[in-house]
Image (spheres, grey):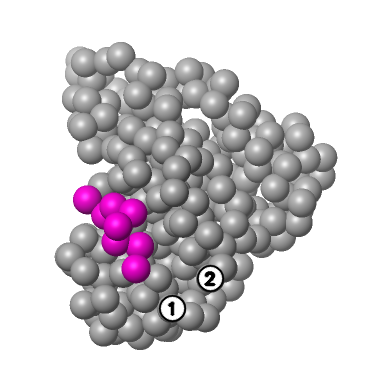
Amino acid sequence: MNIANFPYYIGCPSWSENAWRQSLYPQDARPNDLLALYAQVFNAVEGNTTFYARPKDITVERWADVLPAHFRFTAKFPRDISHGGDLREHLSAAQDFLKLLAPLGDRIQPLWLQLPATFTPHRLGELATFLDALEGQALAVEVRNMGFFDKGEGERVLNRLLLERGVERICLDSRPLFSCVSSDPAVLHAQSKKPKVPVRPAALTRFPQVRFIGRPELEANQPFIEQWALKVAGWIEEGRTPYVFLHTPDNIRAPDLARRFHQHLMTLLPGLSDLPTLERGPEVEQLGLL
């Protein structure tokens, strides 16, 4: 089975990690070649880069030139839109963002709206107006305020609002990260930045969205990997097309974790082939000083 025909999308938070030259990319790969190489192995990527800065027109055109038609780029709305106060005041900026990414066509879907922890259930009217203004655009929403995780009225209204509009609720699973007791600065930094929220494996549309924040020791993630592989296999058997993105604290081993997840999923879905492997060339022998 070619990756273009996979029954789900799998990827990492980014594609431009230089450290991946140790495990994924050829050592001599040029920076401008990394996205095309990444797309030979994975069929999706989180668009974290657009959360922090809008790309230039020429950059979007370059992405459009190298990404195959089956690839999916889940670009995040820039933080000045999602974290800049009343969402209704940023509709023009959101429309401009859509125009900027238009050269990517169907490869940009769904767009992600990652809302801050300060976005409470009392602000759902803003969200409804924002989503209605973008009707027809594939969207997914991530919430972080605990009022959306208490199985109370706020969570019920959110889920109903999204379901009625065909918008997916992104599921963040940070349990592995917070099960880790470590003095590693990368782990401590990730624990200080990532939200610690209950897991909500929503499937409000055909395209469930999962963000998995793993531990740095790959084998320690196995119990969680097995749970998610069962869930994803079930969604696929229901006719859904899940998206699964896998992180590690510094993301150096994110491709290895993604491959581990996929290999376990292969045991549940006969006929699913392994992820491709790039030709990395001969290993360079490290010579010591005489």
| Element on which disc 2 rests | helix
Residue carrying label 2:
165
- 195 sits to left or right of 229: left
Q: Position of residue 132 (x, y in %)?
A: 43, 78
- 66 sits to left or right of 235: left
For marks 1 and 2, give the CA distance. Answer: 8 Å
Does the stretch in magenta take in 119? Answer: yes
Q: Position of residue 262 (x, y in %)?
A: 62, 39
Residue 49 visible (yes or no): no
Residue 168 position (above or below residue 197):
below
Asked where in the image residue 271 lies, by quadrant, the reply is top right
Residues marked 1 and 2 touching at CB (< 8 Å): yes
Residue 188 position (above or below residue 3):
above
Judging depth in this view, the residue of 91 and 123 nearest the camera is 123
| Element on which disc 1 rests | helix
Q: How many marks?
A: 2
Q: Position of residue 90 (x, y in %)?
A: 23, 76
Residue at image coords 77%, 51%: 238
Q: Residues within 10 Å of mark 2 (few under 14, many from 20)?
A: some
Please state which amino acid type lies under the numbered disc 1.
Answer: Asp
Instruction: Look at the image and give the residue range highlighted in magenta.
Output: 118-125
Residue at image coords 33%, 33%: 196
Residue carrying label 1:
132
Judging depth in this view, the residue of 211 and 15 nearest the camera is 211
Residue 269 position (above or below residue 209):
above
